[in-house]
Image (cartoon, rainbow, N blue to C red):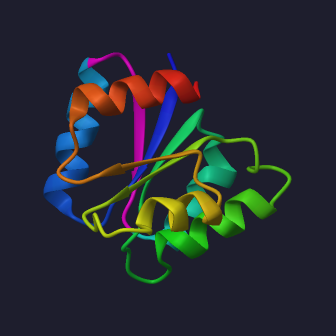
Amino acid sequence: MPRILVVEDNDMNRDMLSRRLSRKGFDVISAVDGQQGISLAVEESPDLILMDMSLPVMDGWEATRLLKAKEQTRDIPIIGLSAHAMSGDKEKALNAGCDDYETKPVDFDKLLIKISNCL
């Protein structure tokens, strides 16, 4: 069963994503900010990371750049999540190192396809 790290500071979003992913058979771990996300990625070696881009302590852009720079975590696929649907945000996420990008509110069926493609 693939392990997914959900890095999301909003309790409701994190809980909803975690529960829905668990029901689909994924092993889910979660972090509430970018720094904790990096620590858990190093400790737990998840198969995929769902990274909110607007996070406290360290934002998702910087956390993604750091994860992709580390030999130990650079090959973990990262899907960036953002409520910002502004022109250029997807490109910014991909340039930071995200393997894919999804806007919030998350279309769960679409997200599952992206997760499958990344795994």
Residue at left offset 25%, top offset 41%? 17
Quadrant of the image occupied by residue 88: bottom left
State the residue at coordinates (58%, 69%): 63
The residue sitting at 73% across, 58% down in the picture is: 68
Horizontal side of 94 relative to 8 (left or right) equals: right
Question: In the figure, 95 relative to 50: above or below?
Answer: below
Q: Residue furthest right?
A: 71
The number of discs equals 0
Q: Is residue 44 left or right of residue 116?
A: right
Q: Position of residue 92 (x, y in %)?
A: 53, 68
- The image quarter containing residue 85 is bottom left
Residue shown at 86% from the left, 53% from the top: 71
Q: Position of residue 117 (x, y in %)?
A: 53, 24
Quarter of the picture containing the C terminus is top right
Any magenta on residue 88? no
Segment tinted magenta in the rendering: 24-32
Most foreground residue, 81 or 19 = 81
Question: Above or below — where is 118 with respect to 57?
Answer: above
